[in-house]
Image (cartoon, rainbow, N blue to C red):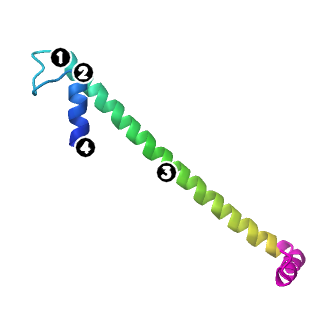
Amino acid sequence: MTREELIRMTREAGIRDCTCNGEFGCLERFAALVSAAEREQITDEWSMCVQSDLEHGVKSLNEQAAKDWLKNYPEIAKFGEWLAARGQA
């Protein structure tokens, strides 16, 4: 979290000039704002990690399926190569 984000949250919580005038509520509001910002940041990072893992998993499954298909159906693969050589695929 940047310095500017923390300053913005202190102002939003009602903290001015590094003093709360004895108010504990402003510190609680500040803590709540910081916690919410941290939760959002963690959620965003987690979401990106899950998306990345899913994309890599799908890629891996596709590569394995292509290998299995070539192994199990070599005649069809050869026909695809034959078409490609003639500009048909």
Q: Which residue is mark 3?
A: 49
Q: Magenta includes 5? A: no
Of 62 and 89, nearer the camera is: 89
Q: Quadrant of residue 53?
A: bottom right
Give me the C-alpha separation between circle 1 and circle 2.
Answer: 6 Å
Residue 45 rendering spot, x and y as whole percentages: 43, 46
Q: Which residue is mark 2?
A: 28
Question: Quadrant of the image for the C terminus?
Answer: bottom right
Q: Going by the image, does 73 lie left or right of 60? A: right
Which SS class for mark 2?
helix
Question: Which residue sits furthest front?
Answer: 87
Give me the C-alpha separation between circle 1 and circle 3.
Answer: 38 Å
Residue at point 74%, 72% (across, down):
67
Badge 4 amino acid: Thr
Single out the mark in the foreground, 1 or 4: 4
Q: Magenta includes 86? A: yes
Q: Which residue is mark 1?
A: 24
Give me the C-alpha separation between circle 2 and circle 4.
Answer: 20 Å
Q: Are the residues flagged by discs 2 and 4 in contact, CB closer than 8 Å?
A: no
Single out the mark in the foreground, 4 or 3: 4
Q: Are the residues flagged by discs 1 and 4 in contact, CB closer than 8 Å?
A: no
Which SS class for mark 4?
loop
Q: Which residue is mark 4?
A: 2
Badge 1 amino acid: Phe
Residue at point 21%, 16% (across, down):
25
Q: Which residues are magenta?
A: 72-89
